[in-house]
Amino acid sequence: MIKVAICDDETNIGAALENDLLDIFGKLNVKFEIGVFFTGEALYKKMDGGAHYDLIFLDIEFARSDINGIEVGRRIREVHQNHLTAIVYISWEKKYALQLFDIQPFNFLVKPLNHDKIENVVRKYLQISGQWSGTFTYKVGHDTQKVQIKDIVYIESHGRKLSLHFANGKHEEIYGSIKTAYEEQLKKFDFLFIHNAYVVNYDYVTALKIDQVLLTNHTTPLPISKHRRNEVRDNYFNIMKQRSG
């Protein structure tokens, strides 16, 4: 469960940010909880009372507040000795960026906020914090099995069976549809559907060529279908862009 706080006295911006986060966390299939605050004092008072937040989107200037966002961040770091909470500052002004060095913010977003940039921040936080650990679920007979998605290098389809190839060199055969596995479980974790018979994990791609991909610890490349080449290339560079912020 990711606990998020939004602290901004511009209610329209706070509401829009909350809606963006609802959409992003829902798409990424990550459980979350959001608290909304309209002054720096309200957020700090809540945290002073014992509340913890993993990720805070914090405005810098408040129209009706005795302390600004910079002071709130400083109190979180120095008074609470909390250096784990990721603070994302938001402001209309870029001039504050240099004043935030000692607070070690996770990121700085300039208003008006952009959905894609918010998603980049969320994805980067989940990856760095290690809280994005999805599982791939499948049936073996009447039993349900689960494996860590991060351990799957690629999935191969042959007939009605799928072969799961893992980073440790092992593989397992199950019954299923590669399209269903991709659409329902793997797409949101940055897998690439390169061929009707292959879905690969972006994290293990070492080289992307026009008609094939090379994977970590695999000497034999996997083919990219001719009709999927543009889609695979676009998806690959979109993932790269999202991860780089």
Image (cartoon, rainbow, N blue to C red):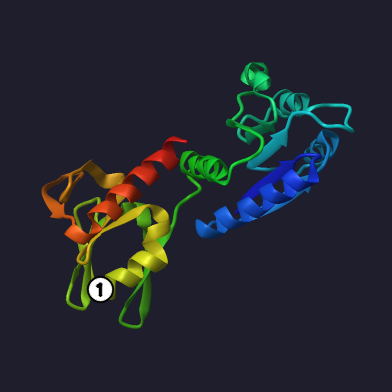
Q: Residue at x 49, y 45 (%)?
A: 123
Q: Which residue is mark 1?
A: 174
Residue 173 percent across, percent down from the top left: 21, 70
State the residue in front, 226 or 243.
226
Count of numbered marks: 1
Residue 69 percent coordinates (x, y) = 76, 29
Q: Is 176 left, or right, of 218 in this rendering? A: right
Quarter-of-image position of residue 172: bottom left
Where residue 30 appears, as percent x and y from the top left, is 54, 56
Disc 1 marks a residue whose amino acid type is Ile
Q: From the viewer's perspective, is residue 107 above or below residue 190?
A: above
Residue extending furthest left? 220
Quarter of image, res 22: bottom right
What crowding class fits label 1: few (fewer than 14 Cα within 10 Å), some (14-19), or many (20 or more)? some
Residue depicted at x 73% and y 44%? 13
Kindly identify the residue that appears in the image at 53 percent across and 45 percent down. Answer: 116
Query: Which quadrant: the N terminus?
Result: bottom right
Q: Is residue 151 above or below residue 207?
A: below
SS under mark 1: strand
Residue 49 location (% of width, % of height): 82, 41
The front one of 150 and 181 is 181
Q: Residue at 38% of width from left, 45% of height from top? A: 239
Q: Is residue 108 left or right of residue 193?
A: right
Asked if residue 58 can be seen in this view, the reply is yes
In this picture, is 170 found above or below 125? below
**129 left or right, relative to 112:** left
Q: Residue furthest bottom?
A: 142
Task: Tell me if 121 is positioned left or right of 13 in this view.
Answer: left
